[in-house]
Amino acid sequence: MTAIGSARNSCFLPDTPPGISLLPSPISRKRASSRVRTRPWDERRCRGLAGSKTANFVVPLFDPLTRTGFAWFTIDYRLAPQYPYPAAVQDVESAIAFVKQHAKEYKVDGKNIALMGESAGAHLVNLVGARNRPSAQVAAVVSFYGPIDLVEYCKRLQGKPVPKGIRDFLQIMEWNDAAAAKLREASPATYLSRKTPPFLFIHGTKDEAVPYEQATLAVELFKKTGVPCDLITVRDGIHGVINWEKDAQFQAYKEQMIDWLHKHLGRRATIY
């Protein structure tokens, strides 16, 4: 088995992986491991990364995947405001396509990929997974407290200044018809169809950044579309798996998540 890169920018390749997982994780260029050069889309994208976010937020997900033998890769994506929507979405889809093209080299099954993300990364995996375009097709998605419907999500913000994150990412400066159209365009809910793969939503009930209602809304929308989905509710959990690490009562999701991945991907898959 092989572990490539640092915790902030890495992948894990067991000899006989039960699956592949891909985890979008924004990083700063100055912290990027030199081993990123094994992934051409990263070397190309990394030159202009804005901001200084790191992948620390997804580190708690590495251990359960590694212990279970899943192959996994973290995906670097360009950051707003230097690179607004849809740059990050394009980067995630490019990364999926790259792993599919190099599946034999990595000794993984390119048809059995799960996409996994948290918070802003969860919005990206929700969107990419909902569309599930042929070149970036995945078999399953695990979404940690990511918005599913941006129009509904932003209703609570009406009458207030547009938050910086939304201004930077979607280039929305005021609430108007053009803003509503952009929100619909960037909403995973807009693209749900029978092509959408099974989703697992994991969300805390005391999340104030992305309300838990986004998870229950997602379940309703998936049922209407006829797409399989499940919801793991983290009772009293706030925003961020890194915060859940502080108390064992919030960590039951890990075993449930692995069971779900095995159910939907079998014993051979790849996680992003």
Image (cartoon, rainbow, N blue to C red):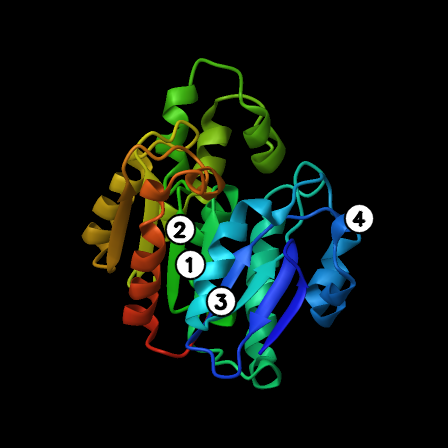
Of callouts 1 and 2, the N-terminal one: 1
- Amino acid type of the residue tagged 4 in the rendering: Lys
When asked about the image quadrant of residue 165, the answer is top right
- Please provide percent x and percent y for residue 62: 51, 59
Mark 2, secondary structure of its residue: strand
| Rendered position, 73 above or below 123 | below
When asked about the image quadrant of residue 184, the answer is top left
Binning the other alpha carbons within 10 Å of mark 4 as few (below 14), some (14 to 19) or many (20 upward) gives few
Residue at the location (21% across, 45% down)?
220
- Amino acid type of the residue tagged 1 in the rendering: Gly
Label 1: which residue? 129
Mark closer to the observer (3, 2) = 3
Residue at the location (59% across, 44% down)?
85
Of callouts 4 and 2, the N-terminal one: 4
Q: What is the distance, in whole Å, between disc 4 and disc 2 at their CAs?
A: 28 Å
- Amino acid type of the residue tagged 2 in the rendering: Ser
Residue 163 or 61: which is nearer the viewer?
Answer: 61
Q: What is the distance, in whole Å, between disc 3 and disc 1 at their CAs?
A: 23 Å
Residue 201 or 132: which is nearer the viewer?
Answer: 201
Label 4: which residue? 30
Q: Is 12 positioned to the left or the right of 157 in the image?
A: right
- Amino acid type of the residue tagged 3 in the rendering: Thr
